[in-house]
Image (cartoon, rainbow, N blue to C red):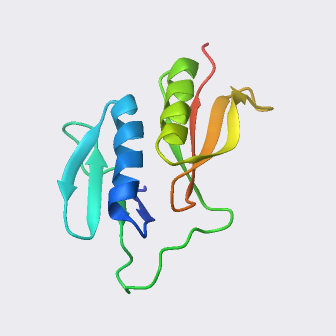
Amino acid sequence: MIVHICMGTNDLERSAKFYDAITAELGFGRRNTTDKAIYWANPGSGIGFAITRPFDGQPATFGNGTMATIASRDPAQVDRVHAAALANGGSCEGPPGVRANGIYTAYFRDPDGNKLNTFAMPQQ
């Protein structure tokens, strides 16, 4: 079981603005902030997501083929999360829409190049 996801950043303030915007749309917020990291979570849960300056002091980099996925309630929320990402320094990696697997999803990168997506399962 994955406890939380952590992304590296080279600019904590810039990334905080980006993640504050998309986590606000998803209904959760900051739980802790240090001089090197910021943590977000759903109310009443443990840490679910974090950004951090790398422990070794080297520049943060993103992995090719690495991606974190965020669940959304419905396609409209997928659209809003994607829009919030792009409005706050993110870049589009695939616009919102239904993919071949029938899932409504959108892909984007944060200001440091980390790849994320958000999806909504088809209504049954």
Q: How many marks?
A: 0
Image location (x, y in percent) of residue 6: 40, 62
The reply to whether residue 47 is visible in this rendering is: yes
Q: 35 left or right of 9?
A: left
Q: Nearer the viewer, residue 33 or 44?
A: 33
Q: Nearer the viewer, residue 52 or 66?
A: 52
Relative to residue 75, is residue 37 depicted above or below? below
Q: 93 left or right of 75?
A: right
Instruction: Report which quarter residue 107 is drawn in.
Output: top right
Residue at horizontal 57%, vertical 60%? 113
Image location (x, y in percent) of residue 19: 39, 47
The reply to whether residue 4 is visible in this rendering is: no
Q: Nearer the viewer, residue 17 or 121?
A: 17
Residue at horizontal 18%, vertical 38%? 44
Residue at horizontal 55%, vertical 34%? 82
Image location (x, y in percent) of residue 15: 40, 56
Residue at horizontal 20%, vertical 58%? 33
**The N terminus is located in which quarter?**
bottom left
Relative to residue 41, is residue 95 depicted above or below? above
**The C terminus is located in which quarter?**
top right
Q: Residue lying furthest right in this view?
A: 100
Relative to residue 31, is residue 124 depicted above or below? above
Instruction: Report which quarter residue 106 is drawn in.
Output: top right
Relative to residue 110, is residue 122 depicted above or below? above
Image location (x, y in percent) of residue 41: 28, 44
